[in-house]
Every structure is written in structure tokens, then in C-alpha cells.
Amino acid sequence: MTHHAIIVGGGIAGSAAAIALRKAGITADLYEARHDGGDYTGAALRLPRNGLSALRAIDVHDLVADISHPVACTELSSGTGRHLGTVSFTGDGHSETPRTMPRARLARTLRRAAETRGARVFMNKRLAGATTTRTGGVIATFDDGSDAEGTVLIGADGLNSTTRRLVSPTAPEPSYAGTHLVYGYAPANTAAPPSPDAFHIYWGKKATFGYTTAAGEIYWYANIASPEPLTAEQPRDTEIWRKHLTKLFRRDRTPAKNVIEAANVILPSNTRTLDTVPSWHTDHMVLIGDAAHAVPPATEQGAALAIEDAVVLAQFLRDQDETAIALEAFEAARRERVTRAGASRRSRTTHRRGTPRWIEQRRRDKNVAQAVRSGAMNPPAWLHDHQTSWQ
Ligand SMILES: Cc1cc2nc3c(=O)[nH]c(=O)nc-3n(C[C@H](O)[C@H](O)[C@H](O)COP(=O)(O)OP(=O)(O)OC[C@H]3O[C@@H](n4cnc5c(N)ncnc54)[C@H](O)[C@@H]3O)c2cc1C
């Protein structure tokens, strides 16, 4: 059978899948629920070298290099400004340096590359449902009443995936992971020391702060432990959050307060995890990226694994005419690696009742410094050195 793919979701996984399918000679139509809201609608991310390898396999590595900046290491410090250690992300003997960029900029660049290579891209099209046909196809329906038919539907619709509910109705829903994650952007002429090739993380008294500078901009985030998630009713107003965050960081000796005071974008969110999804595919539908397996943001691997998924799926469809066999082989090939990646960094901020915070902070700083010295914080080679080739 000649494949024709309907891709749901024009984020990182879906756009990379469209590019990879076109490289495999397969026609692909991509449907994205939103309009293009610009660069600052999501967090900045760092693409580790396994993600860059997957981009190279589909010939878009140079395009992404043009819109990103190298960030070779993470500098870890306490809230008092004391340096606790440096974690290198280039690894022993590797010249490939991870790249950082706003997530939305990466998605748009990949979407445009997909279009250039012959995929059709439809914006403002939200999947509502899908049914399989007697002739071995699948019909996707959208919330504007339109529909589209293909031989395979690829669900790349992220953590809140609609496709996941169709493919695996007993799959868990994402759950709150215990912290509010606020991220944003600021002009680089604020009081944060310019340091374009490093990401800085400070473990402050009340919250963690991270930032890097890149071409006139600061990409930053704040991670705040909280037993309760933010609710839809709570305000997302920039000035309310600026006040809240500057108060949280005011007693730390870090760039946090200055950066947040100067920030032009402040986006509050909850960290969320997804437990194991029992199955990623049916005979004509398959999940990739966050829709299938959301790894914690701290692993800095979600986007990289999503691109790997996209390339590997396109290869199975390229080499196998039977859609169901290709989808089964894809899941078998990918599940172990992404499960192991998700387990590699599951930690929570906890506060032992009765222990004064300053003692906990000293203990934590000591543990961080010790973990850096022992190499326990080094990015695991099996994850980061993984190479994706087009063969
Ligand atoms: C704060 C933060 C920091 C992170 N840092 C890193 C990092 O440093 N390195 C890294 O590799 N990863 C990082 N990640 C993870 C990374 O952003 C995700 O893993 C990655 O974006 C997953 O890509 P995706 O395409 O699967 O999903 P998404 O990027 O979420 O894209 C899904 C797309 O589907 C669309 N969609 C949703 N529903 C529908 C529907 N019904 N119909 C049509 N379209 C739909 C959405 O609008 C969206 O465009 C981070 C995540 C967060 C939250």
C-alpha cells in the first residue's frame, strides 16, 4: 500500500515527522490546532546532541543551527551566589555542542522546512476525532467540521493529546509534578552577566532560577515547589507574577530579581508528568513525542526524543508497506529508550517537616556540589551519544 500520512500537531514532533516522511517519499498533510503566535509562546529549550543527530538525519541541522545558539555547559550555584560546580554537555571527545532556542521558533522553522519539502500544512485545524475505514484507511475530523483521509494518522499533539485518547482509551492523563514552572524572556542589557555558552542555575532560598543569554536576549525560568497546581482561574497577569517572583527571589544573591524586573515575557505553568501509556498505536494510528511519552523538563530530552521518534517512524513506513506492521515495529524500537530516558531524572523538591530551611539548603548545596564532583550529574552517554542515521 502507498502510505499517505495525516499528522496531527505542528509542534516539534509533527513537523519533524513531515520532513522525515517527505524524505522517505511519503505524502504528508500536517494539521496544527493553533495559529503561529510568534517566538515567545513557549519556553526556550536546549537540544542535546542526540536531538541534533536526528535533525542531521533529515537534513535540517543547518537550518536549526541558524536560529539557535550553542550552550555547552550548566553552571550550578547556590542562592548565595556560591559556585557549586560545572556540568559539561559536550561530553568526552564530542565536538557537537547542544543548541538553545525558543521552542516555538524551532517548531516554526521545522514547519516551514516541511512545507518547502512538499508537505501541506494547515493551521487552526484542531483534531476532534478519527475513525478507520473498511478499505484500510483513517478519517480525521476537525472541530470546524472538516475532515481528511489518509492511510495512517500520526498523533503528534503533545501532552494533552486528543489522539492518545483515541489510540489508548485507558491511558493516564498528565498529572501535576509538584512545581510551578514560570518561564520567560528579557532583554540582555539587564544586570545578568552575559554568558552565552553556559546555562546558569541557582538554588535560591525559596525557588530555583535558571537563565542563559543569547543574541541580545535572556531565556529564563523559575521553578517553585508547591503542593497545589495553578488553576485555570488563577491570574496569569504579567505584573502580578513579576511582583510574586521578585518577592520570592529578593533575598538571594543571584541575577534572578534583576532579570525578572526587566522581563518582557512571563509565562506561568505547572510541571506535569505522564505515566506509561499502555499502547502507542492501533493498526492505522500512532503516537509520537509528548503525546506518547512526556519526559520531565529537567531531562532536557523531550524535544530531542520527539525528533528521534519522527525519524524512526518515517523509516519504518518507508521500509514497510503494511501500516500496522510498521507501527508495531516503531513502538517496539522506541519504547525502551524513551522509558529509560524518563526514569533517568525523576526528582522532586521535598521539605522534611521540622528541619529548618537553612539547614536543608546547606545540605542540598553540599549534595549538589558532591554530585557534580562525582560525575552523577553528567548527561548519560547512552542517551546523549545516541546517533540517528537515515539508514
Ligand atoms: C519548560 C519546559 C522546558 C523544556 N526544556 C526542554 C529542553 O531543554 N530540551 C528538550 O529536548 N525538551 C525540553 N522540553 C520538552 C519539549 O518542549 C517537549 O518534549 C516537546 O515540545 C515535545 O514536542 P511535541 O511536538 O511532542 O509536542 P508539542 O511541542 O507540545 O507540540 C504539540 C502540538 O500539537 C498541537 N495540538 C494539540 N492538540 C491538537 C489537536 N487536537 N489538533 C491539532 N493540533 C493539536 C499543539 O498546538 C502543538 O503545536 C521542555 C518542556 C518544558 C515545558
Image (cartoon, rainbow, N blue to C red):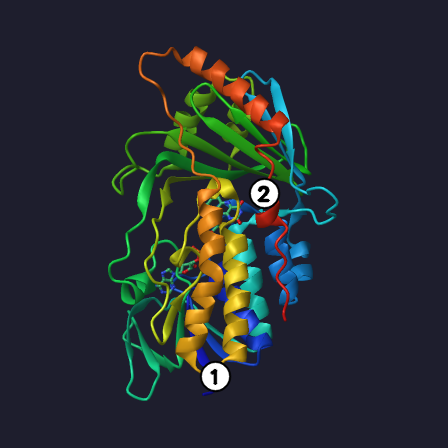
Residue located 54% across and 18% down the image = 366
Q: Is residue 376 above or below residue 206?
A: below
Q: Is residue 192 visible?
A: no
Depth order, front residue of 303/247: 303
Depth order, front residue of 205/341: 341
For the residue marked with disc 1, what is the amino acid? Asp
Give percent across and percent down for residue 364.
Answer: 49, 20
**Location of residue 152 (image quadrant):** bottom left
Quarter in which the N terminus is drawn: bottom left
Residue located 56% across and 30% down the image = 201
The residue to which callout 1 is attached is 321
Disc 1 is placed on an element classified as loop
Q: Is residue 92 left or right of residue 342?
A: right
Residue located 54% across and 24% down the image = 368
Q: Is residue 325 above or below residue 48?
A: below
Give percent across and percent down for residue 298.
Answer: 49, 39
The residue to which callout 2 is attached is 380
Q: Quadrant of ligand 1?
A: bottom left
What is the number of callouts on the image? 2
Depth order, front residue of 132/339: 339
Q: Is residue 322 left or right of residue 389?
A: left
Real-space Cα separation, disc 1 to disc 2, in angstroms: 36 Å
Give percent across and percent down for residue 136.
Answer: 34, 85
For the residue marked with disc 2, what is the amino acid? Pro
